[in-house]
Amino acid sequence: MMMQRYIEPQLRSVLISLGVTPPDAIAFSVPRQEGHGHLSTNIAMTFAKGLGKQPRIFAQEIVDAIGTPPLVAIVEVAGPGFINITFSDDVYHAMLRDLDAFGDDIGRSTVGNGRSVNVEYVSANPTGPLHAGHGRNCAVGDTIANLYQWNGYAVTREYYFNNAGNQMNKLGESIYARVQHLIGNEAYVFPEDGYHGEYIHDVAKNIVDEHRTAYDALDAEGAA
């Protein structure tokens, strides 16, 4: 695309000088075969018939008129009227200078045109332990949101905070049952649809330990 931007203004000027009104955008393609240049255009074949000329002859007129523009090594006619363009190595240096000129705005576009986009991501399950996948989803989701924003969209980042409802009730009942077991109430019935993961035991143990520490502190205070 950047190579096209370098050559298109010169090609447009040449077409005007040869009596042709160029289209809004001149079509370019990348030649499949190595050695046929970096870019190719069939613009001569497009307009030759209307001018009453053979495509290859009109292509040669364009090539003769354009000469060798800056950053271009070779402009030549190929096949029935294609124009193949080979750029010099200086074009890469120019591209790097152009990219550097964008500074922190490199790659930014307005293609989104302010349209609204809602990106919901992470939404870690509150009834289970966090894991590496949640961190990955956080990075991926934020990157997607940044890309939308970089391209001109009005982005809303949303995290679905699922900390209420039946699942949370089950979580609380499961932890409470494990706490009862840890404090010696083995007869307490664990909910049939409760959470059986080892992490429930860990949470319950932490609760019991914290309360035991608090009770021990109170006992010590009373003894004093």
Image (cartoon, rainbow, N blue to C red):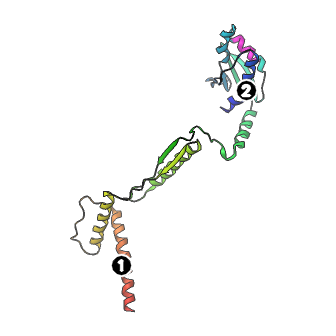
| Residue 82, quarter of the rendered image | top right
Q: Residues within 10 Å of mark 1 (few under 14, many from 20)?
A: few
Residue pictured at 22% horizontal, 69% vertical:
188
Residue pictured at 37% horizontal, 75% vertical:
209
Cβ–Cβ below 8 Å for labels 1 and 2? no
Q: Which residue is mark 1?
A: 212
Magenta-colored segment: predominant secondary structure: helix
Q: Quadrant of the N terminus?
A: top right
Q: Amino acid at mark 1?
A: Arg
Q: Looking at the picture, does residue 106 appear above or below residue 68?
A: below
| Residue 195, quarter of the rendered image | bottom left
Please tell me the numbered disc located at residue 197. Answer: none
Provide the secondary structure element on which disc 2 rests: helix
Q: Which residue is mark 2?
A: 9
Q: Residue furthest bottom?
A: 224
Q: Looking at the picture, does residue 171 appear above or below residue 16?
A: below
* Front in this rendered view, residue 162 or 54: 162
Provide the secondary structure element on which disc 1 rests: helix
* Front in this rendered view, residue 146 or 84: 146
Q: CA distance from mark 1 to mark 2?
A: 81 Å
Would residue 201 be found to the left or right of residue 15 on screen? left
Q: Which residues are magenta?
A: 56-63
Q: Amino acid at mark 2?
A: Pro
Residue pictured at 59% horizontal, 44% vertical:
150
Q: Quadrant of the C terminus?
A: bottom left
Task: Point out residue 18 in the picture as x, y percentages from the top left corner.
Answer: 75, 15
